[in-house]
Amino acid sequence: MATCLATTSRILNSSLSQRVMSAEEAAALIDSGTRICMSGFTGSGYPKAVPLALARRIADANLRGQKFQVTFVRCCAIICSAPSGCPLASTRLTRLAKA
């Protein structure tokens, strides 16, 4: 895993700092068919690089004729943590890959 010293130096738990990786490495861990829920009322809580890396991965797979699709849900933490789950409508990340 590629790590950034500036990022890992802020993480005090060594087992967690070993899990820091690039956006591309994180996107590679996501399988087709996965439902992804992200939140963040402001841009500070939203993982900006991972969705873009995932969109590139999806576009590359689709260009090779492999169907790769994930469900992307963006909602607030209060709704997502409700016992009934996240009721908001989902969008397909493949739309991002086509843009």
Image (cartoon, rainbow, N blue to C red):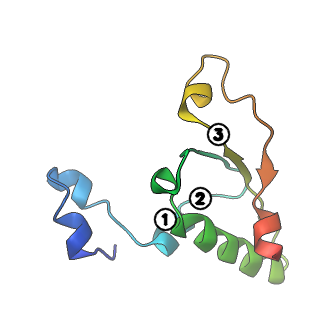
Instruction: List x then y, in percent, for residue 16.
Output: 25, 53
| Residue topped by disc 2 | 30
| Residue topped by disc 1 | 26
Q: Name the foreground residue: 29 vs 83.
A: 83
* Circle 2 Cα neighbour tier, 10 Å, few/some/many (<14 / 14–19 / ≥20): some
Which of the marked residues, 3 or 2, is nearer the chain's N terminus?
Answer: 2
Give residue 17's quadrant in the image: bottom left
Give the amino acid at mark 1: Ala
Number of the label disc, if any, that sits on residue 75: 3
Apparent side of residue 33 relative to residue 48 in the rendered image (left or right): right
Query: Residue sitting at 76 percent across and 68 percent down?
Result: 96
Query: Residue sitting at 76 percent across and 73 percent down?
Result: 97
Extreme front residue here? 42
Instruction: List x then y, in percent, for residue 63.
Output: 82, 83
Apparent side of residue 10 relative to residue 33 in the rendered image (left or right): left
* Circle 1 Cα neighbour tier, 10 Å, few/some/many (<14 / 14–19 / ≥20): some
What secondary structure is found at the residue carrying circle 3? loop
Give residue 5's quadrant in the image: bottom left
Instruction: List x then y, in percent, for residue 91.
Output: 80, 51
Above or below, 2 relative to 89:
below
Query: Residue sitting at 47 percent across and 51 percent down?
Result: 45
Give the amino acid at mark 3: Cys
Which of the marked residues, 1 or 3, is nearer the chain's N terminus?
Answer: 1
Q: Nearer the viewer, mark 3 or mark 2?
A: 3
